[in-house]
Amino acid sequence: MPLSGPQAPIDCGKDGISTPMNLSLWSLKAGDRCEILGYDQVLPENYRTRMMEFGFHPGETVACVQSVAFGAPKVYRVSNTIFSLDEEVADHIHVRLIDTDA
């Protein structure tokens, strides 16, 4: 059975533009960078533990290397390692986008 999770909350910042406060890792596009905030409770504990063993722990910076169409797994870089994750896992990892223009 596929995992499911809640929609990300929306924050209307000082400029009045709505932006997601909590995005999922799955929502990243190729070239995006983010900081991992944590995991939702829908993702089983053994998955969370394994992801942290791979380096996907809160505070870590992750880059989306490849994001193809039709629901294929996306490719992410954590430190010097490349991982391919499908939506069933990546959708339950909460992240904050890192502004690359700053």
Image: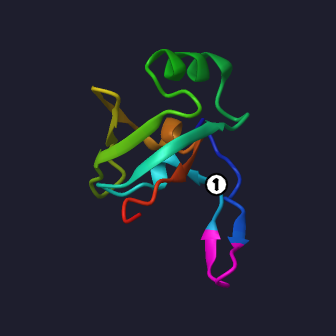
Q: Which quadrant of the figure has residue 91?
A: top right
Q: Which segment did they paint magenta?
A: 12-19
Splitting the image into 4 quarters, where does residue 65 fall?
top left
Q: Residue 23: say if magenta.
A: no
The image quadrant where one finds the C terminus is bottom left
Placement of 20 over or under 37, stated as above or below: below
Instruction: State the residue at coordinates (47%, 54%).
Output: 98
Q: Residue at x 60, y 35 (%)?
A: 1
Q: What residue type is labelled 1?
A: Asn
Q: Residues within 10 Å of mark 1 (few under 14, many from 20)?
A: some
Q: Position of residue 66 (x, y in %)?
A: 26, 48
Magenta stretch: dominant secondary structure? loop
Furthest residue toward bottom? 16
The one of 92 and 72 positioned closer to us in this rendering: 92
Q: In which quarter of the image is residue 63?
A: top left
Q: Is residue 88 left or right of residue 44?
A: left
Quick one: SS at disc 1?
Answer: loop
Q: In this view, does 54 lie above or below 26?
A: above
Identify the residue under disc 1.
Answer: 22
Instruction: State the residue at coordinates (34%, 28%).
Output: 79
Residue 10 position, x and y percent, is 70, 68
Q: In this view, does 89 lie to the left or right of 16?
A: left
